[in-house]
Image (tube, grey):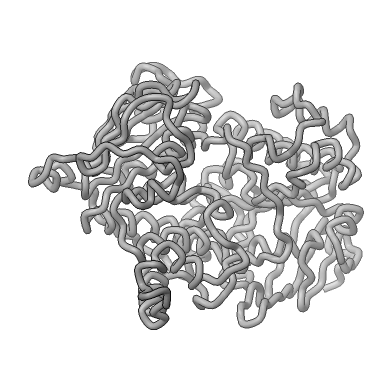
């Protein structure tokens, strides 16, 4: 093929990359036409993020070729890629936490006026550019990163799970901006695990599986099944354990595993009460900033309540530190894997860390017992890596499974899950759904906050809805369809019409009130 006459804005052919024994890409190809929004699809670990990092100079490939507007390019750094017209917004904002926003802009030679224009488009016109990045919430950092990329006016803008940590209104605005770029001279490569987003803005989809390009699909009505087929290698019928008879399982012992009574924290959480029983998955539904962050931080020992009581198995408890919550049997799975994991350490070390004191004697660790316990957890969660691998070299989905595996390995009493499936692929989501149900069936209690409303009926026995820091509704699983939950989350009557801009999405915002600056780690494969 003569690339110079291909008419493509971007063409990558035969891209390969290995990390020791880990093959991130075997033979990946991507062809993007001018003016199209092109989806890059694949299960976690398929190689999507690695390909994007290679195209934008963050990672060097072992083989393959890259051409931009018909000209062969060898990209050695993100700055070189940027000057060549390729810019990416990664899953974790590529922003230096200890620099202010203005200094971060200077690092990428971002023109100030276009940047301010795009900030205003996303509702951040009043952002103080002297603010330290680490003091801003994750959602704001992602928008800043996107505005910076748009201000540079690249030939190809690559968005890696851009909407995964955004509230619903910002997600809609981002999709509008992306859709507005269709038909022009510039293009977008869009990575998302939300099929509704792919269908709303994308023209075509390239699908990767196990590091190889396995197909290119025109995005249209009915194409979702074909995309999933290519991603998984076959049409998979997912069977979910039924979330039923939770109340019957509680009849033998009505003492709640966890009881929250009139709990308040600062100005965000007000007089919240609910009970969580053994054998139950209780969902939490809320819009951004409605107090769900504070609720989980208090329950996991990260913050102290202003008032109220936490009761575990009939005993009142108070936490000064997350370790106190863990000792009481409350373990926390965060949406942000980097918050929970030691990225430079191995899978084995990360999983063994919480229970290592229990497998030792006189200060000596029983290595055989540790290895057996970790291997059982790795097998149960189907973690796709050797247990000796560094966690930073795993895909996002596998990293999340490691955070869950560490508690499964030690035995789960009560698990607090804060949006654990954010930004991970369909197959891994299904595995986590099944695991949570299995844990409940085995007698554990699970409190699950989710930003994807469809998960409630898939996983939960019932759900509470928080609005303005208070519980405003409790909904049984049978009634917890997306429309009902969305009306409750906006504190509307069930018969009232949703605002037009909200009706198009059933994704409730994640939190983001706490400072959550994150930096991009350039040597991490997908």
Residue 217 in the image: state x and y as whole percent. 60, 59
Q: Residue at x 85, y 42 (%)?
A: 153
Q: Quadrant of residue 33?
A: bottom right
Q: Is residue 321 visible?
A: yes
- For this rendering, which residue is in front, 514 or 244? 514
- For this rendering, which residue is in front, 80 or 262? 262
Q: Give left or right: position of 515 versus 196.
A: right
Q: Residue at x 67, y 48 (%)?
A: 518
Q: Residue at x 62, y 82 (%)?
A: 21
Residue 236 in the image: state x and y as whole percent. 39, 64
Q: Is residue 452 visible?
A: no
Q: Is the N terminus in the top left, top right, bottom left or bottom right quadrant?
A: bottom right
- For this rendering, which residue is in front, 98 or 200? 98
Residue 130 in the image: state x and y as whole percent. 81, 31
Number of numbered callouts drawn:
0
Residue closest to the far front: 362
Q: Is the C terminus in the top left, top right, bottom left or bottom right quadrant?
A: bottom right
Q: Quadrant of residue 341?
A: bottom right
Residue closest to the far left: 252
Q: Residue at x 38, y 74 (%)?
A: 360
- For this rendering, which residue is in front, 143 or 320? 320
Q: Give left or right: position of 86 versus 450.
A: right
Residue 125 in the image: state x and y as whole percent. 76, 23
Q: Give left or right: position of 307 versus 82.
A: left
Q: Quadrant of residue 215?
A: bottom right
């Amino acid at each position: 093929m003569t690339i110079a006459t291909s008419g493509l804005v971007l063409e990558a052919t035969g891209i390969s990359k290995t990390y020791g024994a880990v093959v991130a890409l075997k033979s990946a190809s991507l062809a993007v036409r001018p003016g199209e929004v092109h989806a890059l699809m694949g299960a976690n670990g398929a190689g999507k993020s690695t390909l994007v990092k290679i195209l934008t100079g963050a990672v060097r490939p072992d083989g393959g070729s890259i051409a931009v507007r018909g000209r062969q390019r060898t990209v050695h750094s993100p700055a070189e890629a940027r000057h060549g017209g390729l810019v990416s917004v990664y899953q974790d904002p590529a922003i230096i936490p200890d620099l202010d926003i203005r200094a971060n802009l200077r690092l990428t030679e971002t023109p100030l006026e276009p940047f301010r224009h795009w900030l205003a488009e996303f509702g951040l016109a009043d952002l103080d550019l002297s603010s330290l990045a680490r003091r801003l919430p994750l959602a704001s950092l992602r928008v800043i990163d996107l505005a910076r990329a748009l201000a540079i006016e690249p030939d190809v803008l690559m968005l890696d799970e851009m909407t995964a940590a955004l509230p619903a209104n910002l997600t809609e605005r981002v999709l509008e901006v992306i859709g507005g770029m269709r038909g022009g001279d510039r293009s977008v490569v869009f990575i998302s695990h939300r099929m509704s987003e792919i269908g709303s803005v994308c023209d075509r989809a390239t699908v990767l599986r196990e590091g190889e390009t396995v197909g290119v699909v025109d995005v249209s009505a009915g194409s979702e099944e074909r995309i999933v087929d290519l991603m998984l290698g076959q049409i998979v019928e997912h069977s979910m354990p039924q979330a039923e008879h939770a109340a019957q399982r509680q009849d033998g012992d009505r003492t709640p595993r966890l009881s929250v009574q009139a709990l308040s924290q600062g100005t965000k959480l007000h007089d919240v009460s609910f009970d969580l029983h053994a054998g139950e998955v209780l969902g939490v539904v809320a819009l951004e900033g409605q107090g769900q962050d504070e609720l989980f931080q208090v329950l996991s020992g990260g913050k102290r309540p202003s008032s109220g009581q936490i009761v575990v198995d009939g005993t009142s408890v108070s936490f000064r530190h997350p370790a106190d919550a863990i000792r009481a049997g409350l373990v926390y799975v965060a949406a942000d894997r980097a918050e929970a994991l030691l990225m430079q350490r191995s899978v084995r070390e990360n999983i063994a860390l919480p229970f290592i004191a229990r497998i030792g004697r006189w200060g000596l660790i029983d290595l055989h017992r540790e290895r057996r316990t970790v291997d059982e957890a790795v097998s149960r969660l189907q973690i796709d890596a050797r247990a000796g691998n560094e966690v930073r070299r795993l895909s996002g989905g596998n990293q999340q499974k490691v955070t869950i595996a560490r508690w499964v390995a030690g035995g789960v009493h009560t698990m607090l899950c804060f949006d654990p499936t954010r930004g991970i692929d369909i197959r891994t989501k299904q595995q986590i759904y099944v695991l949570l149900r299995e844990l409940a069936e085995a007698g554990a209690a699970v409190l699950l906050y989710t930003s994807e409303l469809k998960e409630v009926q898939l996983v939960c026995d019932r759900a509470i809805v928080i609005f303005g820091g208070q519980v405003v509704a409790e909904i049984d699983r049978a009634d917890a369809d997306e429309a009902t939950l969305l009306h409750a989350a906006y504190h509307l009557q069930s018969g009232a019409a949703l605002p037009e801009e909200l009706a198009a999405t059933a994704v409730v915002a994640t939190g983001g009130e706490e400072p959550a600056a994150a930096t991009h780690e350039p040597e991490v494969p997908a």
